[in-house]
Image (cartoon, rainbow, N blue to C red):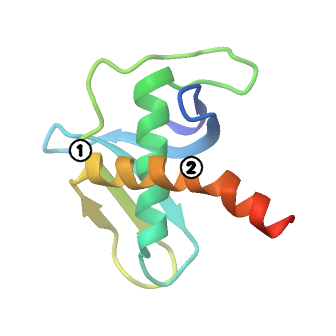
Amino acid sequence: FAEKNTYSVAIWVGGIVDCLARLKTGELAIIDFKSSKAVYFNHVVQAGGYAIQVEESGYGNADGSDWRVLSQPISALVVFPFGGSKPEKFTNVEGFKDVFRHMAAVYPMLLAFKNR
């Protein structure tokens, strides 16, 4: 698919995933397109967050129609920067999902500190 909504009740986040694809290897991959010249750590962490959401809740349209649930876990994250470098594939999906969970836990504290 391209451009589908997803969410996680467990960590209270939601987003729009650019793409989910089955690679020639058989892996199910989240693909995130970026307008940058290179792949950055935060791009892969964001893709890990999408993996959490899609695995937990599935994906569909914003109005709730055409909602689908996965039959297998995400096994790759691909970040595709439009600005020059080639796409990069990451297979440590669980590691990037963990980083996203930690960042989601830190974010409310960061906001509270900024708004003190």
Q: Which residue is mark 2?
A: 104
**Residue 55, horizontal then vertical, whole percent:** 40, 28
The circle drawn on residue 23 is 1
**Residue 100, horizontal then vertical, whole percent:** 46, 52
Disc nearest the viewer among 2 and 1? 2
Q: Residues within 10 Å of mark 2 (few under 14, many from 20)?
A: some
Q: Is residue 30 above or below residue 65?
A: below
Residue in the image at 56% along x and 48% along y? 105
Q: CA distance from mark 2 to mark 1?
A: 29 Å
Q: Nearer the viewer, residue 83 or 49?
A: 49
Residue in the image at 27% along x and 30% along y? 73
Tell which residue pokes out farthest to the front in this image: 116
Residue in the image at 54% along x and 68% along y? 34
**Residue 68, horizontal then vertical, whole percent:** 49, 17
The disc labelled 1 sits on which kind of residue?
A: Leu
Q: Is residue 88 above or below residue 56?
A: below
Q: Secondary structure at mark 2?
A: helix
Q: Secondary structure at mark 1?
A: loop
50 left or right of 77 in image = right
Locate the C terminus by quadrant.
bottom right
Mark 2 vs 1, N-terminal side: 1
Q: Nearer the viewer, residue 43 or 78?
A: 43
The disc labelled 2 sits on which kind of residue?
A: Ala
